[in-house]
Structures are given as structure tokens and as C-alpha cells.
Amino acid sequence: MENLLSVQNLTKRFGAVTANDNVDLDVRKGEIHCLFGENGAGKSTLSACLYGYYRADSGVIRFKGQVAELNSPADALRLGIGMVHQHFVLVENFTVLENIIVGSPDLGILLSKSAARRKVEELCLRCGIELDLDREIWQLSVGEQQWVEILKALYFGAELLILDEPTAVLTPQQSDQLFVILDGMRRQGLSIILISHKLREVMQSDRVTILRKGKVVATVETSTTTAEAITALMVGHKVTKRVSDRSVTPGREVLVVDRAVAIGEWGEEVLCDVNFTIAENEILGLAGVAGNGQKELFEVLMGVRTLSSGGFHLNGEAIVAPTSREMLDRGVGLVPDDRFREGLIPEFGIAENLVLGWQRKPEYRRGPFLDRGKINALAAHKIDEFRIVAASADLPVERLSGGNAQRVILAREFLHARGLLLANQPTRGLDVAASEFVYEKILEKRAEGFAVLLASEELDDLLRLCDRIAVIFKGKIMGIVQPGETTLLELGMMMAGNASNLGGQVNDFSSKALRQ
Amino acid sequence: MLELFQGPLFISILAAMVRIATPLLFSAMGELVTQRAGIWNISVEGTMLLGAVVAYVIASSTGSPWLALLVAVLACALLSLILSFVTIVLKSEQFIAGLALNLLASGLTLFWFQTYIIGRDPPKFAGFEAVEIPYLSDIPVLGTVLFSQRVLTYVSFLLPLAVWFFLYRTRYGLEVRCVGENPKALDVKGLSVGGRQCLAIMFGSVMSGFGGAFLMLGYSDRFVPDLIAGRGWLVVVAIIAGNWMPFRVVGAIFIFALLEAIGIHAQVVGVSIPHHVFLVLPYVASLVLLAGLRSRTHQPVALGIPYRRE
């Protein structure tokens, strides 16, 4: 097979950091080529160089045998390299068609949409995409928005499509659908570079190039390797994934949520009739696609959102019209999903963030003043205990990596919480090692007797960590299941709003990949 | 009070409304395009003032209102380059830049006006005359109200149609709206965001130049420092009140213009309500409109946010 794209000795530096170090990459015509690696391994930088967003410091990029001068995304697009960004670049108030055709040079001064529409419809047909071209983007599901992104690139004549973590925001079923579409494109002779750190996606590619710390570790045919082998290559050593100690059994009930209903900004029910309990030594997982009421549930439990009916009990006491301070005082710890906006004050130092919310505690002050000495001593201790990589305790947390920032939050919450820990997407955006650290700490708390509510989109992780898993969809709990008695497919169906009836026609890529 | 809505006086009020709406329509349609491209240009007031004073100086020294109009518009186009540089190249806060430009324009124009008239009475000049459209101007009521106006008034009434057509029916309009909603979506397709914003700012300033020059050349015979009297700010409010949609903006402007026209005539007729009440009416109306806005906003998502490639 001929090479559509070949990259030789590509190097890209940012200051002292070498993001890509002498990278070689070949992409054949008609293949799905996966770039696999941890955060910061250089996947995104490499793709940014390929679609002209960054200029490589050295190295040669050849496209269709010709040396490609890529000075801007426009250059790449003109050659036939299209990019689908992780965060969609769509105009919410435009229709699907307008989003696809805007900026196209062959529209004529007066928008001649009919010709463009025919071309887009033909593309849809070829790739097996079903979309109403006249709906506006905000009316589409996240999965459909992704297809618009793909169509955009194809409309501009892309022969090589780069997808940056395309399934980060999709349900397992939507991911499967995406892979059906990608497979169709591959058969049309298009090439796809897929950036991912999810094993079950990597296993569906033709070849995989593994990056570690900016260097290519290996390029392998996917059919000749295993998920474990690829992971070991990515991390550089074997990873032991922690699992919950099933011999510890849940004790008395700590949190009881009873028929909780909350109303959103637009009068819609963001939580409808939510019921569940969490006991001592128990992790209750909360599975669901982001935006289905998880955030609102955590806000209610933290006392920053009021329920319109129903209520909850903590340690047997009914909580009425709570404030966030009351919940803190009752020993509730919160790891919010947006760590830099809700978990930390980015401009404050590590030490200050560690006592944030607890600055009035007698231990941290001397009269009306903060006791700097004690706070700094505490910070030094926690930096050590949580292995936070930072030059000093005064370093503003905005300069920390995602993993280290999360450790600051964990350190603070674990120090002050007693009995109940609420963790919303605690490993979002973290690499394997950092995620495992977070899970290790959460499991420690479970062993200590904490009740833990753990919301995550990483279903594999929920299955190995949780005692029970509640699935939330549009503010409703679709069901609470036992990890040992359920499959990814069932979870995925519930996440998409199906309570129990499972169709057999769904392509079960996900569980296949898991078995490998 | 009722006599305001009867017979010749009512026709006169409507005719005044059309006259008052003219400069507002120019400025508002310009500002609308600028804002749809994502730029808050709040220097409409200052730009109109510059247009007016330049028009005055040229008209009174050459005697040609058309030349005056041309130079005034060019001056405003030049002024817009400052805003473009500050907001697009330097990516500064657009409100601050607009405020600064307002201060610059008012200081500059007043200084220039003072030096121009030093040691003499401000010279007078001949402005635009009304042009009656044959046949149409003979229609009762409507003929007087709509078809016995200045040429620029006719232009200003066609302008919203042209702007609507541009924004919604041309490729460039789609691109301009895209810049205001999500500039990156255009940038990744290789089209210049800054270039479009620069042109949109310039179009807005040119239109404000038309508005200011018309205020000067249409109905005054000499320049006074408070000629614009907050109309530039009213335009900004009209955009918001009109929810960034061309014909709704026009609607808001007609409401303002009608209220002002009633105010002027009430003064003449000697209505027992103090005329100051009528003078504040357009501004009160704008506040009420703003507070009463409940529908889904069409404010461009990226309005006022400087575009940077991250």
C-alpha cells in the first residue's frame, strides 16, 4: 500500500520542552492509524504540526509524495488534510449546512445553497451519515455534532482526516456508530489518524503508533498485538490497575437521597425523582454522559443548589436548606469536575488552596490572621504525602499540571472530609498513572469507612472500582446495577436512556475490545 | 395633547420621525454589521461627531455638501483604523478602546472647531435640499412623510434591506456572522478573521460618518458641540433592543424617532407636560426595552471577545 503521508525526523520544541523529538510516521492510503500515548506524550502537538497549526522546528512532512509546506490550517486543508478537533469548532446558531459550507470558495457571492446541499447529501450517503442539514447545531446531540465536523473536512476535500480524541464526549453506542462511519470512510480510500488513549478504540485501528515523552516508541500492526502490550509500550512499564477489595462490605447508610427533584435555569427538571443510598465502605458509581444532571446532583449534595421537592439525609439526619458551609462542617468532601474553576483558585498558591474553605479553622489562624507558618508546614507535608511536583508551596496552582492540581484538591478534601466524599469526574483529562493515583487514594478512603459517590465517564474504571453503579440520564436514575452482573453494553444502553430492554443489533465493539 | 395626533400636525410628526430616524439608521446598520462580526464598537457617538464636524468645516469652506459628505466619511474610515489596530492587532478590551476613541474624537473635533472659528462668527453653509420624488410625493400623507425627503434619507431607508441581504443572502455575510459567532470556525478554513473584522469596523464607521454628516448637512446650518446629543449611544442600545436582527433594530429606531418627534412637536403645541419629559422619552424607552428583553438572545456569541489562536 502506498503512503499518503510520511513524516521524517519531525521535531517541535516549546522553549526548553521538546514536545516531538525526531518523530517518524507513515500513514497509508485507506487505513485507520492510531496515535496512542499518555497526556503530554506529544500526540496533539504532532497532529497540530500535521494540519498546519504549529510549524515543526525541523523535519520533513510529505503528502502524496510531495514535500508539504504547512504554514496554516488552510494550507493543510488545501492539500487535503482535515482536522476534527476535540472541542468542536462549530457555530451553534448556524444550520448544519451553513457550518459545513461557510468559508468555501466555490459558493459564489450569492449563497447558492442548493448545489452545496447536493454535494453534502452525497457525502452523507457515501459515509452512511444521517443528518438533517437544516437543523441548527445546538439542536443536535454531541455525536451528531461530531459528524458535522467530519463532513466539514470532507466537504473541503480532505483525504486524510485527523480526529483528536473523538469519543471523549460520546456514549459507547455513539462511539460505535462513529467507528462504523470511519470504517466506511476507510473503504472509500480515505485515511484517518485517530488520536486516542482508549484501548478499545486503538484495537479497532489498522496500525498504531505509540508515543512516549515526545518520541515514537513503536509502530505496530494492531492485529498482531494485544491491549496489554500496547499499554506497556505507552507507559514504559507494566501497569497494575487497582480493583476494589470485595472482602470489605458496606456498613450503615451514610447518605440517603429521597425523591430529589431540582429545577434548572429554564424551568426544566434537571433532577427528576432521584433516589439512592450510599453506605460506609461503599463506592457508588454514577455513570452517564456529561450534562445529564451529574453536576446538579453534586451541587445539591454540596448545598449550593436547592431542591424543589424531596430531600436527603446525612448520617440519619435530614438536611434542610443546607448551605455549603454546613455541608463542609458535616464532613462532606467534594472533588468538582472543573478543577481549575471550581476546585481551586488558579492564582493562589498550593498552601492557600490547601486551606481554602477552612481558613477560619482555629488551626490555620492566629487571631484574625492566617497562621502562615502552620499552613506552610502543612503544605510541605501534603506536597510530600501526595507526591505533588512543584517548586514551592507558594507556586500558583495554575502553573501545575492537571494531575498535580488534582492532587492538591484531593489533599485538601481528604484532610477535612469525614465520612462522605463526592468525586465528580476526578480523572478527567488525567493520564493512566495520574488516574491510578486518584483511584488509589479514593480506595484508601473506602477502606477507612468513607461513603464515596464517584461520577465518571470511564465505564471500565467504574466497573472495577465501584460496589454499585447508578446510571443517570436526563436527570433520572435509569437503574442501579452491580458491576459483576452487568456489561459495558448494558451500561451504555442505560446511559442512552433505555431502562432495560437491550437490542441485539448493536455492534458490540466495546465489550469485544474489553475481552481482548 | 390629543391634537398631536390630528391632521397636519400628525403628518408633521411622522415626517419628523423619518428625518430623525435617518442618521440613526445609518449608524445602526453600520454598527450592526460591526457587532455581527464580533466587535463592540461603542465609539459610534464620537465617530458621528467627527463626521459632523468634518462635514461642517468642508461645507462651510467649499460650499459643497457632497464634497463635505465624502471627506467626512473618509475621515471616519481613517478613525476606524485606530480601533481596528487596537482591537484586532493588539487585542485590547473593546469597551475601553471604544471609550478612549469617543474621548479622542470629542476632544479632537471640539479643538479643531474652536481653532476653525477663532475670531469670527461660525460661518453658515448650504446643506442638502429635499428632493421630491415625482408622482410618489403627490400621494396624500405618505407623499409628505416619505417622498419629500433628502436623498440620504431615501438611501438610509434602503440600507436595512441591503444589510439584511448582505448578512443572510451572501457568502461574505455568512462569513461575517461566522466571525461573530465562532471566529475559529473560519480561521481553521484558512480565511482571515482579522481582515473581516477590520472591514466590518470600517463599514460601521463609514456608516456612522454618513449619520453624523447627515445630522450636520441635512437640517442644521451651523455646528454646535452637542449636535450628536447621545444619538450614538442610542444606536448601541437599539442594536441590543433589536436583538441583533436588522429589522428589529429598525423597529427600535423608529420607536425612538417617533418619541423624539412627538417631544419636539409637543413643545411647539405647548402641551402642559414639561418638554423635558419628552426629551427623556427615547432614553426611558430604551431602558424599558432593555429590561423587557426576554426572547432567546441573538447576540453574537463571540461579541467583544478578542480572537486569539490559543
Image (spheres, rainbow, N blue to C red):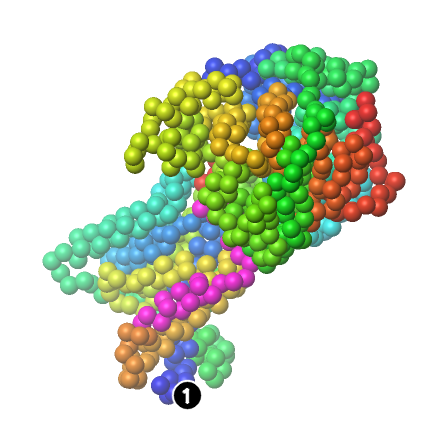
Q: Which residue occupies the extreme left position in the image?
A: B119
Region rendered in magenta: B279-304
Where is mark 1, residue-wise?
B7
In this rendering, position of residue A65 left or right of residue B171? right
Residue A229 vertical placement versus B309 (above, below): above
At a point 58% along the width and 42% down the height, the residue shown is A315
Q: Is residue B135 left or right of residue B10?
A: right
The answer to which of A42 and B239 lies nearer the viewer is A42
Q: Name the chain letter of the residue that bears numbered label 1.
A: B
Magenta residue check for B303: yes
User: Residue A97: x and y, percent?
Assistant: 68, 48
Camera-side residue of A378 and A247: A247
- The answer to which quarter of the image holds residue A234 is top right
Q: Residues within 10 Å of mark 1 (few under 14, many from 20)?
A: few
Residue drawn where x is 32% and y is 49% of the image: B99
Q: Position of residue A195 (x, y in %)?
A: 67, 26
Say which residue appears at 61% left-offset and 40% top-offset. A254
Q: Report whether A288 appears left or right of A369.
A: right
